[in-house]
Amino acid sequence: MAKVSAIDKNLKRQKKVANNAARRARLNAIVKDKSLPIEERFDATLKLAQMPRNGAKTRLRNRCRITGRPRAYYRKLGMSRIALRDLASFGQVPGVVKSSW
């Protein structure tokens, strides 16, 4: 099980990303638009730098929904390999059969 503080920190970041997503996308669009004057693009860059860093999507860490483990994470399932193995061995994941030979 991961540290509770690390899981909580990531949840706070997810909330900040959700709150700042629209404004951040709008400012990024202004910065990348080459047809706008350089002063306007520079002002958008400064405003983007003023925003909280934890509001950026790249600051998020993929974590297992069950254990909070940050590594060996399957995006499609939203869990780590260890949690998947445990659930599969108990028959909780549909379509997954333990192989034996």
Image (tube, rainbow, N blue to C red):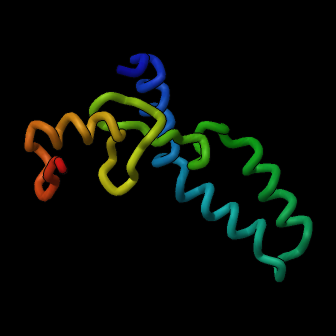
**Residue at the outermost front position:** 101
**Residue at the outermost left position:** 91
In the drawing, does residue 47 fall left or right of residue 98? Answer: right
In the drawing, does residue 58 fall left or right of residue 80? Answer: right
How far across and how far down the image is residue 92, in percent? 10, 43
How far across and how far down the image is residue 89, in percent? 14, 38
Q: Residue at x 11, y 54 (%)?
A: 94
Which quarter of the figure has residue 55? top right
Which quarter of the figure has residue 31? bottom right
**Residue at the outermost right position:** 38
Q: Residue at x 51, y 39 (%)?
A: 61
Q: Residue at x 42, y 43 (%)?
A: 73
Question: Is there any visible trace of residue 65 in the rendered image?
Answer: yes
How far across and how far down the image is residue 95, in percent? 13, 58
- Which one is in front, 7 or 49? 7
Q: Residue at x 51, y 45 (%)?
A: 17
- Which one is in front, 29 or 60? 60
Assign the N terminus to one quadrant of the image: top left
